[in-house]
Amino acid sequence: MPSPTDTRIVVLVGSLRADSLNRRIAEKLVERSPEGVTIEIAQGLGEVPFYNEDLDGAQVPAAAQRLRDLVSGADRVLAVTPEYNGTMPAVLNNAIDWLSRPYGRGAIKGKPFAVVGTTPTPYGGKWAHEHARRSATIAGAVAPEHIAVSQTSIDVDVLGDEEVVGRLLAAVEALVAVEPAAAVA
């Protein structure tokens, strides 16, 4: 397991909106990352084409290759996402699809993965988080169920509430503590 002094986390933000609350949560985590932990937000997820095996050959689209390279170089992956229609947003699902390939050797394979975020519903995004965790696990990630923050934003200033921010940072620390799967041969 990487020591806390050299842990690199890549964040996949499930909302493409420039001022989305989940993007601002990801930015807050970058700003307040624990000592020895580097958190980087994956940029350009909206530029990654929908996964199509016909595109995934000798010339992988540049945006998809950048995403794969970024995640390949990370120790952990964190999704920060809202919930759309009771599930994860298409952009997050698409990112996981690209990261799952090539089959059995994708960039996400063996990486500890967790999901946090908020949405303005009474459920706080828990279904999106469950679906993202399940999809990432099928793609080969290590996604323990105990690391989750599904926060409703109906009556809480998510970014201004230190209790909520503390839970988000605790999720990051728990993700750092997860053992990665055995190295891919």
Image: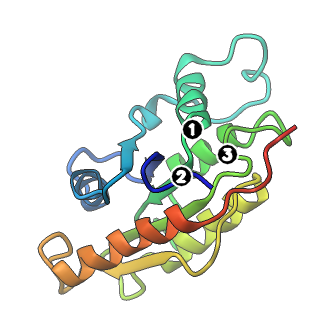
Q: In what element is the residue under mark 2?
A: strand
Residue that appears at 82% across and 41% down: 184
Residue that appears at 66% across and 37% down: 98
Q: Viewed as shown, does residue 1 lie left or right of 184?
A: left
Q: In what element is the residue under mark 3?
A: loop
Q: Earlier in the sequence, mark 3 or mark 1?
A: 1
| Residue beneath disc 1 | 71
- Work out whether residue 168 or residue 13 is closer to the camera in this orientation and state it: 168
Q: CA distance from mark 3 to mark 1?
A: 7 Å
Q: Viewed as shown, does residue 82 lie left or right of 88?
A: left
Q: Viewed as shown, does residue 95 lie left or right of 179?
A: left
- Work out whether residue 147 or residue 136 is closer to the camera in this orientation and state it: 147
| Residue beneath disc 2 | 77
Q: Earlier in the sequence, mark 1 or mark 2?
A: 1
Residue 83 visible in the current orientation: no
Q: CA distance from mark 3 to mark 2?
A: 8 Å
- Residue 104 in the image: state x and y as whole percent: 85, 42
Mark 3 and 2 residues: CB-CB less than 8 Å, in contact? yes
Q: In what element is the residue under mark 1?
A: helix
| Residue beneath disc 3 | 108
Quarter of the image where the C terminus is located? top right
Q: Earlier in the sequence, mark 3 or mark 2?
A: 2
**Amino acid residing under circle 3:** Ile
Q: Viewed as shown, does residue 131 lie left or right of 154?
A: right
- Residue 100 in the image: state x and y as whole percent: 73, 43
- Work out whether residue 32 or residue 36 is closer to the camera in this orientation and state it: 36
**Amino acid residing under circle 1:** Val
> With respect to residue 81, does 109 lie above or below?
above
**Amino acid residing under circle 2:** Val
